[in-house]
Image (tube, rainbow, N blue to C red):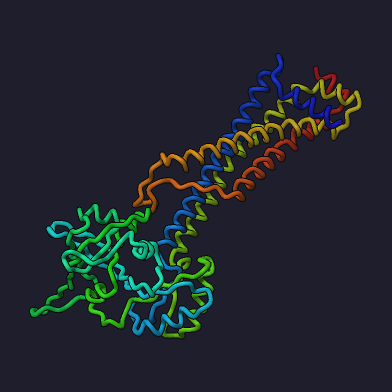
Amino acid sequence: MKGLEWYIARRYLSSRRRGRFLSLISLIAVGGVTLGVTALLTVIAVMTGLQRDLQAKILGNNPHVYVFEAGGAFRLGSPDLVLEKVRAQPGVVGASPFIMTQVVVVKESLDYAQFGQLFGISTDPSDPPITDIQRQISAGELALGPTQSGLPGILLGSKLAMRLGAVPGSIVTVVSGENIKTDALGGLAPVTREFEVTGTFETGMYDYDNQHLYTEIPAAQDLLGLPPDTVGGIAVNVGDAWNAQAVALEIDRSLGYRYYTQDWMEINGPLFSALKLEKLAMGVILSLIILVAAFNIISTLTMVVADKTREIGILKSMGMTDWQIQQVFMLQGLTVGLVGTTLGTAGGLLLIWLLDRYEFIKIPGDVYFVDTLPVALDPRDLVLTVVVSILIAFVATIYPSRQASRLQPVEAIRHE
């Protein structure tokens, strides 16, 4: 009898002389589901893409774990001893000393200054590269020296270099925000050093490209007035970035109370928590579009039941059971949901591909960290969206189909 229920449901869905208005309403219901699924898939893909893009760029430009000396104001003495213990920890694949400090960068002409974050990094071949910048230096794509002027070399973020009007070979003055000296008159005078720009880099992260500078550790030590055996901390990479927290705890236990660690998830936790919450909120809000389409399905089936009351009475008098009548209208509603979900999924995948392929939507990088709208669709999100859409469509069929099945044959036939 399954074929009979489906045959009747298909006829009720098709456009007939007396049912063209109902058929139009069915098309509107299909369109509602289609738009809802397309919007939901696209927005979830954008949120997932943004989250993954930020993770990749953060992990590429930052170590997985930082090691600092407690009470040292980002100053760590005897780094070789700490490095030996850190590198011996299971899960650690690389560790290198670094210096991090806030500075002001001034162009040669002294008519423009820009705040920045200066990193002193190791270029020793025995120290494994920790960040993408260090990897590019190791590969020969970027260099910090030697320079034509004999000054220490410095790498600038692309947007910082553009603001300063600096190109390779330009001389910039770096003003320390930490190493403040007292002059002969008792005034405060920050320490300044000149550097030669040896290149620029682009990470795709607006804040990094607009603020970050890199030089060698000895040049950073000279700017800050640090002795040769003192650095800012130890940068650590682990085999599995998602296991960074556990490795950081083991490093804490190994080094003791004088030192502490911070992992990348702890530092960027608020950002990723906000992204997850925003993704959930957008998913719930856009699911309301599918719910609106579900009400369209309910109204469509209710109108079909009212229009086909006499036919339902005849079918029941010919031997169709209540369950078979209910199946007719459930199949009709499910068809609307399945067609709408299929078209919406196809439309969503097409839109996601276009966004990924052509990147035609630009966004302000100073607000959203990235310049273009990244997209990435998780298969789990795709399956969840499809299942939820079909489930909503199925639930929408229950009430009108049960009302149809409860019609009494005699009363139904007398309807007209």
Q: Residue at x 33, y 79 (%)?
A: 75
Q: Is residue 222 left or right of residue 27?
A: left
Q: Residue at x 69, y 42 (%)?
A: 391
**Horizontal side, residue 210 vs residue 354: left or right:** left
Residue 284: image location, x then y, percent: 57, 47
Report which quarter residue 123 is drawn in: bottom left
Q: Quadrant of the N terminus?
A: top right
Q: Position of residue 373 (x, y in %)?
A: 43, 46
Q: Nearer the viewer, residue 208 or 145?
A: 145
Q: Residue furthest top?
A: 17
> In the picture shown, does residue 189 fall above or below 35?
below
Q: Residue at x 71, y 24 (%)?
A: 13
Towards the viewer: 381 or 410: 381
Residue at 17% x, 78% y is 181
Q: How many marks?
A: 0
Q: From the viewer's perspective, is residue 273 above or below residue 407?
A: below
Choose between 211 and 235: the one closer to the eye: 235
Check the image and report above or below for 211 versus 372: below
Q: What quarter of the picture does the C terminus occupy?
A: top right
- Across and down, in percent, residue 168 comes to 22, 57
Residue 97, image x and y in percent? 36, 75
- Tell me where residue 196 sits by quadrant: bottom left
- Would residue 40 appear left or right of 9 to someone viewing this image? left
